[in-house]
Image (cartoon, rainbow, N blue to C red):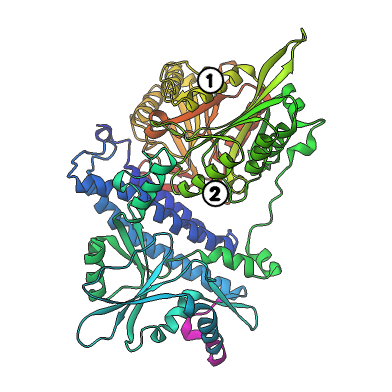
């Protein structure tokens, strides 16, 4: 077992430490005040997903009596759950402290959230009018006897529950708040003053349960086990996915969180109705942070500018080209580095492809899209113009399943051929290919390819928030390999034979073996060896062990790992030559880059694959070699900037905690 050697840590504990790093940004005085509030919202959202997915999986193992020991920590599922339940209350207390601090500073800066007890008579009257005219009639209110089950709870939004003053038996009030309601009521006066809708509902909840009087009212939120009943990972048709989503909505609860500590009677009610124990009930001061983006839109622009990051200027690379994109990329490869570069280059490529007489088809893999994507518009335009448009749309993109079902319907209706990935492997690779028919030197027509490989989704919104790389190339070896991969995905027969898609490294065929071979190549060089990796997560045991062996041989291993990292650096006689840097800042570090060796011996890949077993063995992933020397230099400069960042960068210590980087 790896844990016996002392250079690994538990995956879940590592993730909680990462989310604590996110929360630390809310306490950083150098971060603009409103952005600090956003980091609190991100922390809360991250924790919610953690319970749905990771805690859900552990609960499933624990319920089955599974005594499998985590090889990186020696912990059973029950051990890991106990540790999580021990750590989460402390994180929530830290979040509450950060929230109180940020709210106080925002108030001093002229953006004041008012508590009910702070309202004067006039403000109270305004809030009552708001409640009476815009809120009350839209609420679904029920009075429940103690023997009644809780109504259906949608995990995507909070609810309210009240303990009612009843003489003969315990009664509870249940309030369903629709998503369509505003989350904020702005009040007139000096500065920007507002109350939250949920606080207004609490203030006037005594009007909702007449003749009963609410004794205590709490906002509650649950997380359901996203892995229950087989989850959605096995659902690879539209019908199967719809059934899986219905199962998820009725799945067991993993946790319940409330604002404030419910009384013993209410906790007992939750325990019985949700089949959870006290360890799975958490308290905090504020649950629902959806209001943050609504607040951003309401604050006067002049005030908001003082409290947030300066607007970005995303470079439009199309303005720098001497000609259209298609003829330009025929001459040399092009790299977009988001968010420094905009997505205009890729979107422009699709726009040109949709109308070019030389283009015969477009192929693309879709995992997550923005709300109103131009990408879809151009694909539909191409299909209506007679191009053959093939879309590999992965229905199993967690928590985007319903959106992807709708995109599949829209694309199919427009004439695009939609494929739902493969039965066995989730398609996570980010690829697009333009198929051209060109005139060769001898006058004949030939097929050629323009290929795009990205480290992140084709999503215009996240391209402004995540650091990702997008390579567009006319390299026909890469083009033919991607063409073979698309063909096999659409036939539901992805090859597992090594070299099937060379020069790409592809999961599940050979990405693992290619990366291991390159790690071992550098290991043999000893102190002359060099490995640089930038990933979101490192959990795969074989990769971890190979990197440890490289370190023991004297090879320099430098890694940027944004999130989960099960390898511990700097452990004596194991990982002394490994340094791991973590960066959390304005942008989400999302690109994956693997670099082996240096000089003429250097090999570089970009990919959407993390070094996790699921990416290397259970998904279709593609790592694309980078051959252009100028593009290589730009990518290495990007990595160097992140690795050397002393403001937002942290270095991982041998115990898995983080320390500020020295100036």
Where on the picture, by quarter, is residue 553?
top left
**What residue would you read off at disc 2?**
648
Front position in the image: 559 or 333: 333
Where on the picture, by quarter, is residue 618?
top left
**What residue would you read off at disc 1?**
484
Q: Which mark is residue 254?
A: none
Residue 663 is at least partly visible in this image: no
Label 1 environment density (alpha carbons within 10 Å; few <14, some 14–19, many ≥20): some
**Looking at the image, is 116 positioned above or below residue 159?**
below
Q: Position of residue 14 (x, y in %)?
A: 37, 45
Front position in the image: 222 or 356: 356
Return the disc, 2 or 1, that comes first in the chain's sequence: 1
Q: Are marks 2 and 1 in contact (CB under 8 Å)?
A: no
Q: Is 123 inside the magenta-drawn segment?
A: yes
Front position in the image: 48 or 537: 48
- The stretch in magenta equals 113-124
């Amino acid at each position: 077992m790896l844990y016996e050697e002392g250079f690994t840590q538990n995956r879940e504990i590592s993730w909680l430490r990462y989310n604590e790093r996110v929360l630390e940004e809310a306490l950083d005085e150098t971060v603009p005040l409103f952005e600090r509030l956003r980091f609190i919202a991100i922390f809360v959202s991250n924790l919610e997903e953690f319970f749905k997915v990771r805690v859900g999986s552990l609960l499933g193992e624990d319920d089955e009596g599974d005594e499998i020991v985590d090889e990186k920590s020696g912990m059973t599922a029950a051990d890991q759950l106990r540790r999580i339940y021990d750590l989460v209350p402390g994180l929530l207390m830290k979040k509450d402290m950060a929230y109180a601090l940020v709210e106080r500073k925002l108030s001093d800066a002229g953006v004041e959230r008012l508590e009910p007890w702070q309202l004067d008579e006039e403000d109270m009257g305004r809030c009552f009018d708001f409640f009476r005219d815009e809120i009350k009639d839209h609420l679904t209110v029920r009075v429940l006897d103690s023997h009644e089950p809780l109504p259906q709870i949608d995990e995507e939004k909070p609810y309210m529950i009240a303990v009612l003053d009843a003489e003969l038996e315990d009664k509870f009030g249940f309030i369903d708040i629709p998503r369509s309601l505003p989350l904020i009521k702005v009040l007139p006066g000096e500065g920007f003053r507002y109350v939250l809708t949920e606080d207004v509902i609490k203030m006037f909840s005594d009007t909702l349960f007449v003749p009963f009087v609410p004794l205590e009212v709490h906002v509650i939120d649950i997380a359901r086990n996203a892995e229950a009943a087989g989850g959605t990972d096995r659902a690879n048709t539209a019908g199967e996915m719809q059934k899986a989503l219905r199962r998820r909505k009725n799945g067991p609860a993993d946790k319940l969180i409330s604002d404030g500590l419910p009384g013993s009677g209410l906790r007992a009610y939750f325990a019985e109705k949700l089949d959870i124990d006290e360890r799975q009930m958490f308290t905090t001061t504020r649950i629902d942070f959806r209001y943050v983006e609504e607040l951003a839109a309401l604050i006067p622009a002049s005030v908001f500018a003082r409290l947030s990051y300066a607007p970005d200027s995303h470079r439009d690379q199309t303005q720098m080209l001497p000609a259209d994109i298609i003829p330009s990329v025929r001459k040399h490869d092009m790299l977009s580095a988001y968010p420094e570069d905009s997505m205009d280059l890729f979107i422009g490529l699709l726009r040109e492809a949709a109308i070019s007489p030389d283009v015969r088809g477009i192929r693309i893999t879709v995992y997550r899209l923005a709300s109103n994507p131009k990408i879809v518009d151009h694909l539909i335009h191409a299909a209506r113009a007679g191009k053959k448009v093939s879309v590999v749309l992965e229905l199993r993109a967690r928590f985007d399943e319903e959106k992807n079902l709708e995109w599949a319907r829209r694309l199919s209706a427009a004439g695009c051929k939609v494929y739902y990935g493969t039965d066995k492997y989730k398609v996570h690779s980010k690829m697009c290919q333009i198929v051209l028919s060109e005139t060769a030197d001898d006058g004949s027509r030939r097929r050629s390819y323009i290929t795009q490989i990205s480290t992140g989704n084709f999503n215009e919104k996240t391209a402004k928030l995540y650091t990702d790389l997008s390579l567009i190339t006319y390299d026909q070896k890469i083009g033919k390999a991607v063409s073979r991969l698309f063909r096999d995905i659409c036939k539901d027969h992805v090859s597992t034979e090594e070299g099937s898609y060379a020069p790409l490294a592809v999961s599940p065929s050979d990405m693992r073996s290619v990366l291991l071979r390159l790690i071992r190549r550098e290991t043999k060089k000893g102190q002359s060896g060099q490995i640089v990796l930038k990933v979101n997560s490192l959990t795969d045991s074989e990769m971890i062990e190979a990197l440890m062996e490289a370190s023991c041989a004297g090879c320099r291993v430098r890694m940027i790992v944004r999130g989960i990292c099960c390898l511990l650096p700097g452990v004596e006689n194991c990982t002394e030559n490994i340094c791991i840097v973590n960066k959390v800042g304005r942008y989400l570090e999302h690109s994956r880059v693997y670099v082996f060796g240096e000089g003429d011996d250097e090999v570089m890949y970009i990919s959407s694959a993390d070094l996790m077993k699921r990416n290397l063995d259970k998904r279709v992933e593609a790592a694309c070699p980078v051959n252009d020397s100028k593009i290589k230099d730009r990518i290495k400069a990007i990595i160097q900037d992140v690795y050397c960042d002393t403001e937002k960068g942290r270095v991982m210590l041998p115990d898995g905690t983080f320390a500020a980087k020295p100036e």
